[in-house]
Amino acid sequence: MATPPRALVTGASRGIGKAIAAALAGAGYEVLGTARDPAALSQAEKIPRVLYLPLELTDEKSISSLVAEAGEIGILINNAGGSQIGPIEEVPLEAIRGLFEKNLIGSVRLTQALLPGMRSRRAGRIIFISSYAGVSPVPFLSVYAATKAALTALARGLRQEVQGDGIRVSVIAPFDIHTAIPLDLRYASDSPYKDALLRVKEVRDRSLAEAPDPSLVARKVLAVLSAERPRAFYPVGRNARLMGFLLKHLPDSFVERAARKLFRIDATRR
């Protein structure tokens, strides 16, 4: 039996990344997992048979050091990132740039560094963990959604650029998964959006608390890796396929009204 390729999972210290690293290790893969500070992880927080390496996606030197230490990588799971909530009008530009650096640019830079090795071996798998928010943005999570939409678009383009080199690229887009992803809350103290924003956050927090476990995404990763011809885009989560079908076929006006009702947002603000 051939030895499985070495896998690198970013953001493997918690949530979806941790579940993916655990699933890959359990399936016999040699797994490298990244964390901002692996030394700060307790033994109980670490997954057996996973080698933890430091990575700060917004730091070019950190990415270069990781690539040098990781060596040959056959599977890259771009998972690490952050979330943000706030009115577009009030989110500082530096915070927007920072989220794009974390959710898009860092993953692009890491992918760029590992692609030459995959091309030379004419083999490789790259999976981007995006979000269904990139397909159907939630009010006040617009910047986060924009980073995920950009990540999805980039992955789809990359998929066609490298398919002739034996490299397979896919996007997995979770829809309401139970995780504790850090949420950067941004709004002015006298914001006219405050009440609506906090209602959206309340609904969002409750939905995540009641959502399926991250192992659901991990199982999808294993399925994608086992597929000879993986698809470009995989929605994952409770009723994700149904939601995808409805979003594709229902009028935008209907979807927007449903979102306002779900998040208790008035169409007009007085």
Image (tube, helix red, strand yellow):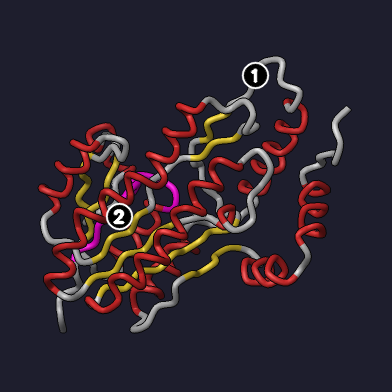
Residue range corresponding to the magenta coloring: 6-16
Q: Secondary structure at mark 1?
A: loop
Nearest to the observer: residue 82 or residue 238: 82
Residue furthest to the right: 270
Give the mark nearest the N terminus, 2 or 1.
2
Residue 99: x, y in percent? 45, 37
Identify the residue at horizontal 21%, vertical 56% (top origin): 49
Residue 70: x, y in percent? 14, 52
Residue 11 belongs to the span the image colors magenta: yes
Residue furthest to the top: 190
Residue on which the image places disc 1? 188
Q: Is residue 62 left or right of residue 263?
A: left
Q: Which three-letter amino acid code belongs to the residue tagged 1? A: Ala
Q: CA distance from mark 2 to mark 1?
A: 36 Å
The answer to whether residue 41 is visible is no
Residue 6: x, y in percent? 19, 64
Identify the residue at horizontal 16%, vertical 49% (top origin): 67
| Rendering quarter of residue 63 | top left
Nearest to the observer: residue 223 or residue 233: 233
